[in-house]
Each structure stands twice: as C-alpha cells, then as structure tokens.
Image: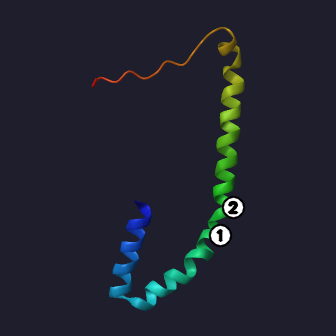
Amino acid sequence: MKTLVAIVGWCILFVLCWPLALLVLVLWPVVWLVLLPFRLVGITFHALFAFLHALLMLPARMLGWRPHKPQYAATA
C-alpha cells in the first residue's frame, strides 16, 4: 500500500511540477543510501534491547513465569 501511495504521489507531482518530480526520482536512491546506516543502527539497538530483556527475564522464566496473552473484550 505504501508503494501505491508513493507512485500516485509521484504521478501527481509529475503532473504539477515535472522538474521537481524528476529530481525526486534521481535523488531517492541517494537519500536511501544516506539513511541506510541509521536503519542498521536501529536494528542493532533493537536486537541489543531484546537480548537484555531476555537476559534480565531469564531468572523469572526459570522459575516458571510466562507472559500472559492479552485478553480482548470483543469475541467472535
């Protein structure tokens, strides 16, 4: 769905201001490459915090604690 919205948005931009749309088309890979290290850092921190959570919860898990599943009010 995000891709469809991006394509439709680009087409509207192309109709309204084609030089800007072509500039966006050319610069999008450059922006993606610049933002790639930030995504990798985010993935690394997410994995680190998941590991720390698992490590800190290990004693409770060894004693038999299990996370409860959320109860939803609406039932089908």
Q: Residues within 10 Å of mark 2 (few under 14, many from 20)?
A: few
Q: Quadrant of residue 21?
A: bottom left
Q: Secondary structure at mark 2?
A: helix
Q: Quadrant of residue 71?
A: top left
65 or 7, which is in the foreground? 7
Residue 52 is situated, as x and y percent measured from the top left of the image, at 70, 31
Which residue of the protein is positioned furthest toward the top in this rendering?
63
Q: Residues within 10 Å of mark 1 (few under 14, many from 20)?
A: few
Q: Quadrant of residue 49?
A: top right
**Amino acid type indicated by mark 2:** Pro
- Residue name at image x 51 percent, y 86 percent: 23
Q: Is residue 37 above or below residue 10?
A: above
Which residue of the protein is positioned furthest toward the bottom in this rendering?
19
11 or 47, which is in the foreground? 11
Q: Are marks 2 and 1 in contact (CB under 8 Å)?
A: yes
Residue carrying label 2: 37
* Side (left or right) of 72 relative to 68: left
Q: Is residue 56 above or below residue 8?
A: above
Residue 55 is situated, as x and y percent measured from the top left of the image, at 72, 25
**Amino acid type indicated by mark 1:** Val
* Side (left or right) of 30 relative to 19: right
Tally of numbered discs? 2
Residue 9 is situated, as x and y percent measured from the top left of the image, at 37, 74
Residue 66 is situated, as x and y percent measured from the top left of the image, at 57, 15
- Residue name at image x 65 percent, y 63 percent: 36
Residue carrying label 1: 34
